[in-house]
Image (cartoon, grey):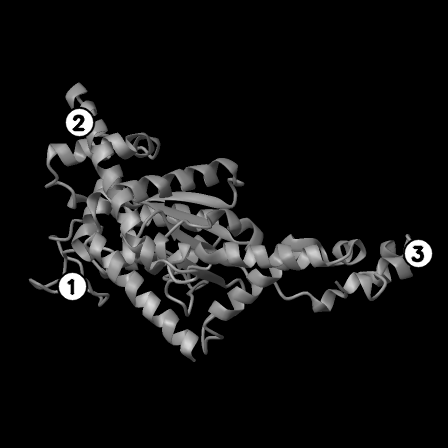
Amino acid sequence: MSAGLHPSAAANRPANVCKRPEDRLPEHSEPQQHKAIILLSACPRSGSNYLENLLALHPHCRKSKVPEDFFLANSETLLNFCRSVADSWDDWWLQRLGGASRLAMHVGTALLRFADPGPEEEGPTRDIRLMLRSPTTEGIAAATTLFPDAKVLVLVRDGPPTVESGRRSFGWPYEEAMLAWRQSVRRVLSFLASADGARCQLIRFEDLTADPAREIARVIAFLGLDPALYPSDRVDEIPVFGSSSFGRTEGEGVHWRPVPKDSSFDPLARAQSWPAHRLARFAWLAGAEQRKLGYRVHPLSPMGRVWSVVLDGIYGARRIAIQIALLPLRAPRVFSDRRRRYFSWRRMSRPGDAVQCALRNRRRSQQGMIF
């Protein structure tokens, strides 16, 4: 609209003006780049708290003031904003300012500044790595755009123990959690196939718990940190946070108080009680992804395959019925895509919970319209 009222900047300048050094943005206006460690886990209940606390032992690693930021999971909105803004610029400004990717990088710098807890009274002041942690890999592809200088750590855990841990902690439905684990691992594998190997490292929770000193040494080397500064003798001091069963009294919900480890703590045994039919169901739904990560896959018999096809139809029909039942409750900006993404993990233990959440959102929307 403004193009019709005012001549563009390019129209008032010779063609060679944009090539002159004095027309470039001044260097001092560029924000200082912050080094960052982006710590993602394929799903919640994968041990990201444990990995973050292990890394925090290094004096050059600092935790964010936002425990779980979900920056990347919600990054599509920011990237669309950057594209829209860049599309509003004429060609001369676009060349001078660097386009949408340049703007997105500056937005990422602002996010890092927001998450920075501030200067410490004591300790090193240079080469500090800020850790951004999110228990999801949604939006992982935007990491290279928003945080081009960051290193990405992706933590994965075997599927059945992850699902069982989520079931005990938050009431995850088995079927939906299996599908979500599969989708997340596919996202991770796709990113690893396209990302620069020097920027991203895959870590298995099982390796981390079996030999934390060896695994954290590998991570420290990948991050380019000084291994001599890491207190390896303190690795066993890391307590347990948010366990699905350890350190909880009977009837107590999951909590995030530190609990000292003892010989009874065994996070690798979460799915040992799974019956054969549940293991077979997971193998049918996510066996290929499980195998690509190097985990053992439960064998499937011919009858197991036939029964899995039947279950696909049953669960598919149930999902369709739930979606149809929720249609009258949906309204623009009320039942948003972002909220639906996290139903399986953080809010929905039964299909009825989704209905209750939709009703609650609708009431909030109506109250907002009144004001």
Is residue 172 shown left or right of residue 123? left
Q: The disc labelled 1 sits on which kind of residue?
A: Gly
Q: How far apart in space, not on screen, are marks 2 and 1 (Cα)?
A: 35 Å
Quadrant placement of the C terminus: bottom left
Q: Mark 1 points at which residue?
A: 253
Residue 183 appears in the rendering: yes
Q: Mark 2 touching mark 1, by CB under 8 A?
A: no
Task: Give coordinates of residue 116: x percent, y percent.
Answer: 48, 69
Is residue 44 shown left or right of residue 112? left
Q: Mark 2 points at which residue?
A: 307
Sequence-first tag of 3 and 1: 3
What is the crowding at mark 3: few (fewer than 14 residues within 10 Å), some, or many (at least 20)?
A: few
What is the crowding at mark 2: few (fewer than 14 residues within 10 Å), some, or many (at least 20)?
A: some
- Mark nearest the camera among 2 and 3 is 2
In the rendered structure, find residue 362 and report the number of the disc placed on it: none
Q: Residue furthest top?
A: 302
Q: How far apart in space, not on screen, are marks 2 and 3 (Cα)?
A: 72 Å
Residue at 71% from the left image edge and 55% from the top image edge: 98
Relative depth, front residue between 166 and 271: 166
Q: What element carries label 2?
A: helix
Q: Which residue lies furthest to the right in this view?
A: 14
Residue 342 appears in the rendering: no
Q: Name the residue under label 3.
A: 14
- Mark nearest the camera among 3 and 1 is 3
Q: Mark 2 touching mark 3, by CB under 8 A?
A: no
Residue at 37% from the left image edge and 72% from the top image edge: 366
Q: Is mark 1 on a helix, strand or loop?
A: loop
What is the crowding at mark 1: few (fewer than 14 residues within 10 Å), some, or many (at least 20)?
A: some
Q: The disc labelled 3 sits on which kind of residue?
A: Pro
